Amino acid sequence: MRVTFTANGKPVEADDVWEGESLLYVLRERVGLPGSKNACEQGECGSCTVYLDGVPVCSCLVAAGQVQDREVRTVEGLADDESGELGLVQQAFIDAGAVQCGFCTPGLLVQTDALLEQDAQPSDTDIREALSGNLCRCTGYEKIMDAVRLASARKCQKVGHSE
Amino acid sequence: MSARTIQGQKNLQDINQASKDGIGGSPLRPDGTLKVKGEFAYSSDLWHEDMLWGMALRSPHPRANILSVDISEAVKTPGVYAVLTHDDIPGSKFYGLEIQDQPALAKDKVRYHGEAIAIVAADHPETARRAVKKIKVEYEVLTPIVTEEQCLDPETYGYVHEPHEYKSHGYGNICHEQRLVHGGGVTDEIRALADVIVKGTYEVGMQDQAFLGPESGMAVPAEDGGIDLYVATQWLHVDRQQIAPVLGLPEEKVRLTLAGVGGAFGGREDLSMQIHACLLAQRTGKPVKIVYARDESFFGHVHRHPAKMYYEHGATRDGKLVYADARIVLDGGAYASASPAVVGNAASLGHGPYVIPNARMHAIALYSNNPSCGAMRGFGAVQACFGYETQMDKLAAELGMDPVELRQLNAMAEGDSMPTGQVIDSPAPVAELLQRVKDMPLPPPLDLDNLDVRTLPGALSNTSHGEGIVRGIGYSVGIKNVGFSEGFDDYSTARVRLEVIGGEPVAMVHTAMAEVGQGGITVHAQIARTELGVEQVTIHPANTEVGSAGSTSASRQTYMTGGAVKLAAEAVKQALITKGRQRYGWTQNDIDLVGGKVVSESAGVLVSMVDLLGDEAIDLTREHHHRPTVPFDKETGQGFGHVQYTFCANRAVVDVDVELGLVKVVELTAAQDVGKALNPLSVVGQIQGGCTQALGLAVMEEIIVKDGKVRNASFTDYLIPTILDTPPIPVDVLELPDPNAPYGLRGVGEAPTVSATPSIVAAIRQATGIALNRIPVRPEHLTGTL
Ligand code: FES
Ligand code: FES
């Protein structure tokens, strides 16, 4: 089958998609967006998290056909399109040392982005709750907490300034 | 190099971004930007328009004879390009890290659940999966040999490797064993010197590395008949050493380039998909990519050895250890992997960082029909630490002493002897590390009136509102060796090139070190910057075009490859200064490179590096070997076996819901001596990550194996700590230089994984009063509903 959807603001289409293919597979293997990662393909690790119509989902659990005519935003879409400048959350993860092997990072970035969209100043417990579906095997999560707090602080500062 | 281009190959670790700081600073990782943009090419991201997908058929039985394999239906499946079995292997049929006992594809028998029997290459992973299903194997299923009793009685239960099979190394089903006798050993006379004796039997479950990036890579056939393999591994050269003979190729025709690695923790020391992808590429003439699904990953790599341990300690009334005795039985599973070295570690480190006048040890690894076990972070020291630290708590209780004081009373220090007779010739601040974690402020007590239930055990499941919650505190300390031991000529190679690019002096560092996430490339750039006084450093992709770097394991890479980078950079610096002396006739003895200039303390700036270098590049390669070690004596375990030791202490605070058996670690504190923190940010990150894997082993992580069959090969069923399970981990870093190591540094990565587990279990014990002799601790152990 053919699947057409929007990925990071651009229309994409994938041909000869087999019915059982996941959105994750289509993104990674068919439309050249391998940023979302394949760690469990069971909805347990969150490495494959993308926005689907603005809502974070595990793309390994979404059938390719389900995204017909919908909007997908992946980690590749978090940086500024034109300048290529890193998004706030991306920069905070680098600065805080929250990236080790980095395999969990794309999913965590999308999930964190979504969290801060909803609540720019989450408590530690809120952060832990929001990110509890994203496994990281390397960091022990401390630096990830630091990164989210840093992104939150920077976001609030930015909002504060523009107001 | 193949003429084909592979998407992803370009940005594979091609890290050109420069950062500014030298050692001791915390510059950001050079691969960080690619990683947060989703552009870093992990081994599972490689793509070629002409590529095929490889997949293996795996045995559903832990022990069976293979009567026949029928591939005829599979071959006929449209889209299938090749189906290969043992008979199709062009070269040697077996490989292995230490003992060549593992068939590349099972021959006439399978020895563990998940062993690969045949491999398929097809145009879509789903086609490959369907073809795999069509391969018909006729088995004669045999009763698996899985318990210690069965393994040790081959006359009754049989052999995992028949005695006439050339692969077996030890005897019977014993893969390797190591004994140790220290002081007067453990005899009735020695026992009589002790006022109190404590004994215990302990068990450790099978832990998995559970790195997130699945085993994967791509093999590309080259025009010269060789193979280019892009793969996530821990040691490119040792992979090649094992792959080439199986392919029937000389080593130089098998070229490996490191693809992005999504964590390793020991699980990538052994081969997984490498040979299979290469065989399929060789046969089909096309690039072949293999990416394990998570369940296949559980079958495709070796795990941490489960252990049964017996410990006995005797002490005087005032708490001085008189003797220690232990027997450690590690289940090595079907193939040897790194078991012999794991046994060596368990035996030599198995009595912990304590001064013990008399000691005895017997450590063995068994061959069984359970999954193979090998390297995992902590490598043989983890299991033992749970044993000896539990004993320390028991002894303290028996003596009515404070558990930290008892440990400090017996803690080893510089100048003391290991039970192997090796004198510790660098700082060993065991007592101080314990004091440091003890002195750190405690988290506030549970405030039942002001409670966010999400912070309680059971957290989001809303299982409790604070009733039945008890808090406990536990301590532990551990010891780990750094680098390869027992006479292994451990070395690493680095190439450093200095040249002028764009009007600036730029250093390039080329090694075969596997960056697996630990941050080694950041540190290499820091070293080059420090030694050469330049800002810009680029890291060449790791491949087999440069000499071996050894494995990214045993906490050795900063020491070994960092040391090699230092040597090569120093050589480049000397060559540059010599060049200047020849050209300008400098006679000063105090010449150095600083800020892109050649300077002399007495005479000031001599010349800029740019002017001195001109169009010339200085390109030098150096090897770094650590000082020699010797194998342990088989019977007495004596010998200078380890090159360096590293120590970490922990304090755990836990809340336990004693009604439901749920545990929440509230805080896990660590203090570690790192000799010199080359990159403090990375050092702390490593310690926190190591502590979290230890937390996993303490309370949740275990591959459940029943009658040789794996029951939980998925992230749904194999639990690793989430951010909700992981508490704040305050880290106190101590820097006491080791005079024998580059910059005085000490390996960092493993010590916290060794030491942190027992502190958590001790805290649960303190909260509940339950003995807890087995890890992971499960709810049923706490509620008595086993
Ligand atoms: S890969 Fe989708 S949740 Fe793990
Ligand atoms: S950084 Fe490796 S899994 Fe998170």
Image (cartoon, grey):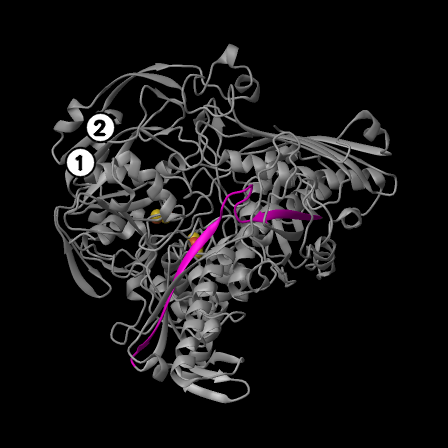
Q: Residue at 55% of width from left, 15% of height from top?
A: B153
The reply to whether the C-beta atoms of the residues labelled 2 and 1 are less than 8 Å apart is yes
Considering only vertical position in the picture, is B60 above or below B644?
Answer: above
Please state which of residues A97 and B600 is positioned toward the viewer in this rendering: B600
B597 over B530 or under it: above or below = below
Snapshot quadrant of residue B16: bottom left
**What residue is at 54 percent from the left and 33 percent from the top?**
B306
Provide residue B646's location: percent of width, then percent of height. Answer: 62, 52
Q: What residue range appears in magenta?
A: B474-502
SS category of the residue bearing label 2: helix
Residue in the foreground of this view, choosing between B163 and B310: B163
Q: Subunit of mark 2?
A: B
**Between disc 2 and disc 1, whose residue precedes?**
2
Residue at disc 1, secondary structure: helix
Q: Position of residue B446 (x, y in %)?
A: 68, 55
Residue type, label 2 = Asp
Q: Is residue B216 left or right of residue A65?
A: right
> Does the magenta run of residues contain B130?
no
Q: Residues within 10 Å of mark 2 (few under 14, many from 20)?
A: few
Label 2 CB sits under 8 Å from any ligand 1 atom = no
Q: Position of residue B230 (x, y in %)?
A: 28, 49
* Residue B323 appears in the picture as rendered: yes
Q: Which residue is mark 2?
A: B88
Q: Would you say B687 lies left or right of B359 here?
A: left
Q: Is residue B721 above or below residue B443?
A: above
Dot 1: chain letter: B
Q: Quadrant of the C terminus of chain A?
A: bottom left
Q: Is residue A42 visible?
A: no
Label 2 vs label 1: CA separation? 9 Å
Which of the labelled discs sits on residue B283, or is there none? 1
> Residue visible at 83% across and 42% down?
B320
Q: In the rendering, at what x and y percent does residue A77 appear?
A: 28, 65
